[in-house]
Image (cartoon, rainbow, N blue to C red):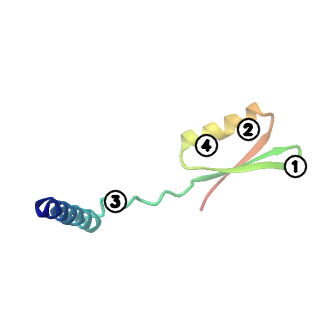
């Protein structure tokens, strides 16, 4: 019974050491991703929706969605 207990303690210690190594090497940290564009859709002068595009593919997708829905849209770069 004690062997079982010691095995689990050793596994837990190994787990903690691995977590500490990952934390210290920044392997668990992600780079912050910021939106590059703001897209606003309008029906006439009425604002319908606003969304953010993080890359050019997403920007094109939002523009296509607005056009297919019959909206006009504006695109502004995020500073």
Q: Nearer the viewer, mark 4 or mark 3?
A: 3
Q: Earlier in the sequence, mark 3 or mark 1?
A: 3
Q: Is residue 24 above or below residue 47?
A: below
The image shows residue 53 at horizontal and vertical percentages of 60, 48
Q: Earlier in the sequence, mark 3 or mark 2?
A: 3
Q: Are marks 2 and 4 in contact (CB under 8 Å)?
A: no
Classify mark 1: helix, strand or loop: strand
Classify mark 2: helix, strand or loop: helix
Q: CA distance from mark 3 to mark 2?
A: 37 Å
Q: Residue at x 61, y 58 (%)?
A: 78
Q: Earlier in the sequence, mark 4 or mark 3?
A: 3
Disc assigned to residue 46 = 1
Q: CA distance from mark 2 to mark 4?
A: 11 Å
Q: CA distance from mark 3 to mark 1?
A: 43 Å
> Which quarter of the picture shows residue 26?
bottom left
Disc assigned to residue 66 = 2
Q: Which residue is mark 4?
A: 59
Disc assigned to residue 28 = 3
Q: CA distance from mark 4 to mark 3?
A: 28 Å
Query: Left or right: 76 with respect to 24?
Result: right
Query: Is 75 in front, or is 46?
Result: 46
Q: Earlier in the sequence, mark 2 or mark 1?
A: 1
């Amino acid at each position: 019974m004690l062997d079982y207990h010691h095995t689990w303690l050793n596994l837990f210690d190994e787990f903690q050491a691995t977590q500490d190594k990952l934390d210290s090497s920044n392997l668990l940290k992600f780079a912050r991703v910021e939106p590059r564009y703001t897209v606003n859709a309008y029906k006439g002068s009425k604002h319908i929706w606003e969304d953010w595009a993080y890359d050019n593919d997403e920007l094109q997708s939002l523009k296509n969605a607005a056009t297919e829905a019959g909206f006009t849209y504006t695109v502004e770069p995020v500073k």
